[in-house]
Image (tube, rainbow, N blue to C red):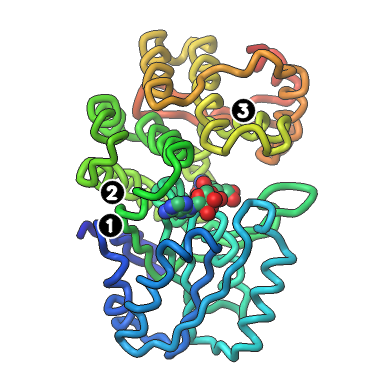
Amino acid sequence: MKIVKVLLGNRSYNIFIGCGILSEIGSELLRFNFSQRIVIISNPKVFSLYGSIVVDSLKKVNFEVSSLIIPDGESYKDYFWSYHILSELLSRGLDRNSCLIALGGGVIGDITGFVASVYMRGINFVQIPTTLLSQVDSSVGGKTGVNHPLGKNMIGTFYQPRLVWIDVDTLKTLPMREFLCGMAETIKYGIIWDEDLFKTIEAERLNILGLSQSHIGDVIKRACEIKAHIVSMDEREAGLRSILNFGHTIGHAIETETSYSRFLHGEAVAIGMSLEASLSERMGILDKVSVLRIKSLINSYGLSTELPPDMDLEHLIKHIEIDKKRENGEIKIIIPERIGKVRIKKIPLEDVRRYFEL
Ligand code: NAD
Ligand code: GLY
């Protein structure tokens, strides 16, 4: 078992990474001073795959466990379903020392974290992420949230879990398309922070795509270390944490333009990273060889690096202009300087068009 620490004073916690560790979660939770009642929040697909392993593990050490299943999909990560969960928790009599477990991908993790942060002004929650994206990104760092018709993740809190429990074996049932989305976010860590990680993802492609557990476990651990470090330096995204948004300015614009239906998030981020790398080259910052290396790595994981030909650039630019990262009339964009290092660049609104004429 590998352990990564997220250092946040009295809100510090551990990320545990291992193979076949789902059945050990019960004994780990005994170390905490939680009350008996635990509620697992999940969706039908993930719960049918892994629910019984987690339930049995908790029951074995005498927790009183129940489950709360919400439908599968981003459209259920909303206020209505969080209200439904809150009502259920109240009627089941959860107290302030109870614990929620998020068993699933980023959708389940985000809504569970949000509910945990507001139920009785905050109760314990544990992340058991089961997608690669949630293992390397969303389960770590304490961003919680639900969507609103006027914007994605617009209602949320910063609220840290008590621990993150990553069982790499759960990836065996994950559809390949979802796995590759997680790889897009993993490649992102290589570009923004760690050239060695980038090189490992290049060199170990066959092992990673073949789901070699030791290779994937190592890559997940490194991604979690990087995210843990960044979050411990800047929990509330006052500055440094925004580098995690590399590829997301264009990525979000693509998702908005296609009404979140054509591309999965990681697929849009993959195109965004490629185009933002090209943008950096045009600005005279990133060298051509690095741009080609970035694009070729993204491609080698079956992800696209180009906008689809039918996409209207004008529309994308409009979305970028109203992007939520706009601050004081400026867009904040993350630009690679070299593989392993990025800088935060502010672009005045009036210059956005000039920079993004791709
Ligand atoms: P997801 O939670 O929708 O999961 C993708 C699909 O995989 C779902 O159908 C799910 O049921 C299924 N699934 C999950 N685990 C499985 C498994 N082991 N085997 C088979 N199927 C499995 O998507 P996601 O990509 O994990 O997360 C996306 C969400 O994460 C978005 O809502 C996004 O906003 C959020 N997010 C949050 C943060 C953060 O910092 N909080 C960061 C990035 C993304
Ligand atoms: N996924 C970006 C962040 O956690 O800040």
Tell me the residue at 35%/78% (across/down).
Answer: 56
Instruction: Give the distance between the C-alpha atoms of the residues marked 1 and 3, in whole angstroms.
Output: 32 Å
Instruction: Give the distance between the C-alpha atoms of the residues marked 1 and 2, in whole angstroms.
Output: 7 Å
Percent from the top left, x then y, of residue 55?
40, 77
First along the sequence among labels 3 and 2? 2
Tell me the residue at 53%/70% (across/down).
Answer: 41
In terms of secondary structure, where does tag 1 sit? strand
The label shown at residue 250 is 3
The label shown at residue 17 is 1
Quarter of the image where the C terminus is located: top right
Circle 1: residue type: Ile
Contact between labelled residues 2 and 1, with CB atoms less than 8 Å apart: yes
**Lateral position of residue 263 relative to residue 192, left or right:** right
Q: Which residue is mark 2?
A: 221
Looking at the picture, tell me which residue is in the foreground, 113 or 343: 113
**Lateral position of residue 59 relative to residue 104, left or right:** left
